[in-house]
Image (cartoon, rainbow, N blue to C red):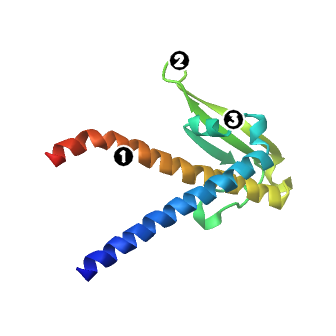
């Protein structure tokens, strides 16, 4: 019985730590949203999650060289919108243009990279919730 309780306790701790991390992430994301002027392009914070994705040009988002400048490129935040009714289904929308990547202030560049990572962190939770909801249709079959 103790092993089962320990597993339950560990699972509960993991879930609560993810929820705490998610809440902290949203607070930091809202701050960055205003700090790097995304609010000038997308007036309502929650509307950033209507985009299919948000990408970055001019700096790396890979873990092994996160934030590393790509020489000769321009630092720009690009949102991808998707409209299944449109002739061209997806399009890129600039949320922020910051000029030549190697000339951008290091602190600003770091805030931009952090914004994108924090956005993707929250977006992954939203995707998880979406698919969990979709699977409830099949869960009924398992419960029978």
Location of residue 121 in the rendering, given as x and y in whole percent from the top left corner: 56, 54
Could you tell which of marks 2 and 3 lies nearer the N-terminus?
3
Location of residue 38 in the rendering, given as x and y in whole percent from the top left corner: 75, 41
Q: Mark 3: which secondary structure?
A: loop
The residue that disc 3 covers is: 44
Q: Is residue 20 above or below residue 43?
A: below
At 81% from the left and 60% from the top, the residue drawn is 107
Q: Mark 2: which secondary structure?
A: loop
Label 1 crowd bin: few (<14), some (14–19), many (20+), radius 10 Å: few
Q: Is residue 36 above or below residue 10?
A: above
Location of residue 108 in the rendering, given as x and y in whole percent from the top left corner: 81, 55
Residue 58 shows in this picture:
no
Instruction: State which mark lies toward you, 2 or 3.
Output: 3
Please state, as top left, top right, bottom left or bottom right, where the C terminus lies in the image: top left
Could you tell which of marks 1 and 2 lies nearer the N-terminus?
2
Label 2 crowd bin: few (<14), some (14–19), many (20+), radius 10 Å: few
The residue that disc 1 covers is: 132
Q: Is residue 144 left or right of residue 122?
A: left
Q: Quadrant of residue 78?
A: top right
Q: Is residue 100 left or right of residue 91?
A: right
Contact, CB < 8 Å: mark 1 with mark 3? Answer: no
The residue that disc 2 covers is: 87
Residue 81 shows in this picture:
yes
Of 110 and 44, which appears nearest the observer? 44
């Amino acid at each position: 019985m103790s092993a089962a309780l320990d597993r339950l306790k560990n699972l509960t701790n993991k879930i609560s730590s993810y929820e705490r991390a998610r809440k902290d992430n949203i607070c930091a994301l809202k701050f960055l949203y205003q700090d790097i002027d995304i609010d000038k392009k997308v007036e309502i914070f929650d509307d950033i999650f209507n985009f299919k994705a948000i990408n970055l040009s001019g700096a790396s988002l890979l873990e092994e060289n996160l934030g590393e400048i790509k020489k000769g490129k321009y630092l720009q935040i690009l949102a991808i919108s998707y409209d299944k009714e449109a002739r061209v289904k997806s399009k890129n929308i600039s949320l922020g243009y910051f000029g030549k990547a190697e000339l951008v202030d290091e602190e600003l560049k770091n805030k931009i990279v952090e914004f994108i990572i924090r956005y993707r962190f929250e977006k992954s939770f939203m995707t998880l919730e979406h698919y969990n909801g979709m699977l409830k249709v099949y869960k009924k079959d398992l419960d029978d």
